[in-house]
Image (tube, coloured by chain):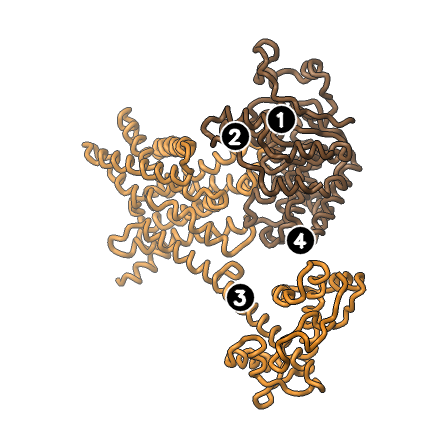
Chain colours: A orange, B brown
Amino acid sequence: MTAGGHFVRALTFQGGHNTAVATLGLALLGVAAGVVGVYALLRKRSLLSDALAHAGLPGVAVAFLLALAIGAGARSMVALLIGAAAFGALAAASVQLLARVPRWKEDGAIAATLGVYFALGVVLLSFIQTLPTAEQSGLHTFIFGQAAAMSAADAWRIAGACALVAVVALAAQKEMRLVCFDPAFARAIGWSAGAIDALMLALIVLVSVLGMQSVGALLIVALLIIPAASARCWTDRAGVMLLVAASIGAASGWIGGALSASLPAMPTGPVVVCVAAACFIVSIVLAPRRGALAHALRRRRTNAAVARDHLYRAIYELEERTPTRAQPIPIEHLSAMRAWSPRHARRILNRAVRRGDAQRINGACALTDQGRAHAARLVRNHRLWEMYLITHADLAPGHVDRVADEVEHVLDQELVARLEAQLARDGLPTDTPQSPHHIQTPTTPSSPTSRSSPTYPT
Amino acid sequence: MTPRSADTPPREPPPASAFPSPASEAREDPAAFFARRPEHSPDAPLSIHDMTIAYHRRPVLWDIDYDAPKGKLVGILGPNGAGKSTLIKGALGLVPRASGRVLVFGKPYEKMRREVGYVPQRESVDWDFPVSALDVVAMGRYAHIGWLRPVSRAHKERAMACLERVGMADYASRQISQLSGGQQQRVFLARALAQDASLYLMDEPFASVDAATERAIVGVLRELREQGRTCLVVHHDLHTAPEYFDEVLLLNMRIVAHGPTRETLTEDNLRRTYGGRLTLLSEAGEALARRAPANPPPPTSAARRDQDAP
């Protein structure tokens, strides 16, 4: 069978019992990690989560050794969990303590903690490998993870934990959201932000321990954070973000699990994380509002609209200068007035022609009636705004053009109405006023003396 | 109330037996406390007693002793670094108090939290958070809703009414990062209104807001006063203070003066509030924090500007 065939069988849970269990377990782990990751990300605790996950490694090693010493089942999930939780708490305390060292920031404290605990974990695991007991088999996979080691019982535990995480995350959604957004306000209304923080950290430790066997202590944080970060691209609602993150986490675990099962000697954790990363890249590129593509398109549209507005105003103001207002404007006058290259000017003009706002007459151009109406409105807004700036913001007439330029494209109807009302109160004209400053055009000399500027009360 | 001044140097440390230690004072029954300190009223919406707050051994507030008047708008004024925000945070227990005690309507603050509304500084949170304006205002109802319960329709409607009072009803479902700074400030104010408190502590609600927001906030403050509620507002603009506030509290690491606005905003009081920070108190603070640089920072440009203003 081809690798592709293996993959499809694994994906549809037909690749044998062990593979089906592992794939399902990874998908459920992805759900739990996605949900918990949303809070880790929103609380800006990504790096701390990483430290906690790494600290889980010495935690399970110590728990294993203790359980072995007292003769209990050394691979008991409960014992490993308690060990990891204890070391997670220890790591969190180390970070708190180190961050208090003068001139040391939390950032450095977390990085140091993370490295030291992980090193300790690797040392202990290596020691455990030398012990003459059969129970340690599989412990060495805790670093990179190996889903094939997952038993049906493990998958059930993950399913149970997944349900627990979902219940807690839904029940305490309001509390965790408030602490993530504004912990000081939570404390002001008498809620223990510390307790809610501890609950969130506990969930992080729980997911890290569950994922340690299949995804590995090194990479579990990626499965926490990447689905949440991807989900943030798609939505502005915390509730929806939980659902999307859970789905992306599930998909990563499912597809990644199937991939690693169908390819020879592929470690599970790295494959799952690569699948999650692919989801993330798709998200940041394609997401409708926050995605890079949408962003680029939006900017292009804005730039085009601004260039168009400039074109209409330039033609309108040049036409104002011609006696009959009907004489076509040579394109090189346009490019001279707006400092556009002739090619750029032609490109903008072509777009206006396509919209039916302008027409080309040999080497010249003119506005259509539709275009002129639009241009008149633009010029009026621009000049009203200029007058407002001169009379109310104390700007010199020579300086208002640029400022008005930046604002006029965002003037909405309501603002224009308020502008008119204000100027009317000041006794200024509110039809299209004359430009308050000299307009430099290719056909007029550059000195403002040729034209008297209107004066406004200040 | 006549304006009071407090330009006496910091109290000599009293003999250990003369006063109870701060710890035992904090546990003392409020009734016994008020009997011992008759200058404080059990009816005051907020009573702060001998509060001192230090950040990393550098004291930022000394011996704050203050009763807020009921049903008044009080402006807290002072130069940068005077401890205006710290006063509010200390009263709310958001920063640890080195000493002192806070009573709300004569009872320990911990029992009266629901009577206290809080408007933090707008910059204190990350506004790129996936919630709507209405979600944030509903947070003001959380203390009433209680733990682990969803926000009911009735609470959402109250939150909506609060958004309306600040003129933001049209923006209820807007994600908060898409609001302007002034609109965000109004959302914070609406959240405090949703707390339905008797005493409001507001940290710089007028900081860098547009004119419409400023009008909306002033309108809401006056409404609150008409309803007999008390507002303590950290404020930075001396010019608008007489128009907005019934009383002012002039602060520069300690209370310089407080009382009705017109009588208290005297040239002398302002000079003592804004005229540089090289006071006996800050020198004493420096002596305590021996690791700190030898000289206190010069007055900031804002402080100098404000000093010239009146």
Q: Residue at x 79, y 36 (%)?
A: B227
Viewer-side label of 1, 2: 2
The three-letter amino acid code for the residue at tag 1 is Glu
Is residue A226 at least partly visible in the picture?
A: yes
The picture places residue A310, in percent across and down from the top left corner, at 60, 73
Q: Which residue is mark 4?
A: B171
| Chain of the residue on which disc 3 is drawn | A
Q: Tell me if mark 2 has few (under 14), some (14-19) or many (20+) residues whose alpha carbon lies within 10 angstroms of its own.
A: few
Instruction: Give me the C-alpha separation between circle 4 and circle 1.
Output: 34 Å
The three-letter amino acid code for the residue at tag 4 is Tyr
Q: Which residue is mark 3?
A: A299
| Chain of the residue on which disc 1 is drawn | B
Q: Residue at x 56, y 51 (%)?
A: A237
* Disc 4 secondary structure class: helix
Same chain assignment for discs 3 and 4: no
In the displayed structure image, the side of residue A363 where residue A24 appears, left or right = left
User: Label for residue B110?
Assistant: 1
Q: Residue at x 52, y 67 (%)?
A: A297
Q: Residue at x 48, y 64 (%)?
A: A293
User: Label for residue A185?
Assistant: none
B4, A410: nearer the viewer: B4
